[in-house]
Amino acid sequence: MKELLLAVSILLIALGINALIFWGVGNLVIYAFNIDYTWTILHGFVSALVWNIVKGLFSND
């Protein structure tokens, strides 16, 4: 049970870091091109989640 909790915690931490990266890149693009849009951390989280799912589907491992 402890191993499962540790694995889920590590997965959520990694996904949270990826969400912050996607949020930052999204805000950078919006700022660089002067787009009138609000990019939230939820957008970054969903983008990171989709990225991980697509990466898993197309990886060779």
Image (cartoon, rainbow, N blue to C red):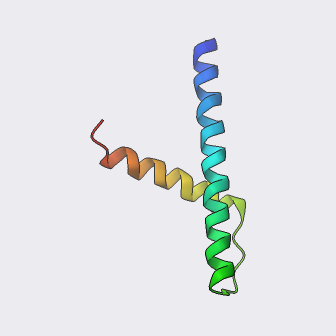
Image quadrant occupied by the C terminus: top left
Give the answer, above or below, for where 49 lies relative to 10. Answer: below
> Which residue is drawn at the image coordinates 63% and 37% (left, top)?
12
> Which residue is drawn at the image coordinates 58% and 56% (left, top)?
46
**Quarter holding residue 7:** top right
**Quarter holding residue 23:** bottom right
Kindly give the residue lying farthest to the left in the view shown. Answer: 60
**Quarter holding residue 34:** bottom right
Q: How many marks?
A: 0
> Which residue is drawn at the image coordinates 49% and 54% (left, top)?
50
Q: Position of residue 10 (x, y in %)?
A: 62, 30
Give the answer, above or below, for where 8 lies relative to 42. Answer: above
Q: Position of residue 44 (x, y in %)?
A: 63, 59
Q: Position of residue 11 (x, y in %)?
A: 58, 34
Q: Nearer the viewer, residue 20 or 40?
A: 20
Give the answer, above or below, for where 34 lies relative to 53. Answer: below
Image quadrant occupied by the N terminus: top right
Q: Position of residue 18 (x, y in %)?
A: 60, 49
Q: Is residue 13 left or right of residue 59?
A: right
Q: Is residue 15 left or right of residue 38?
A: left
> Which residue is drawn at the image coordinates 66% and 72% (left, top)?
28
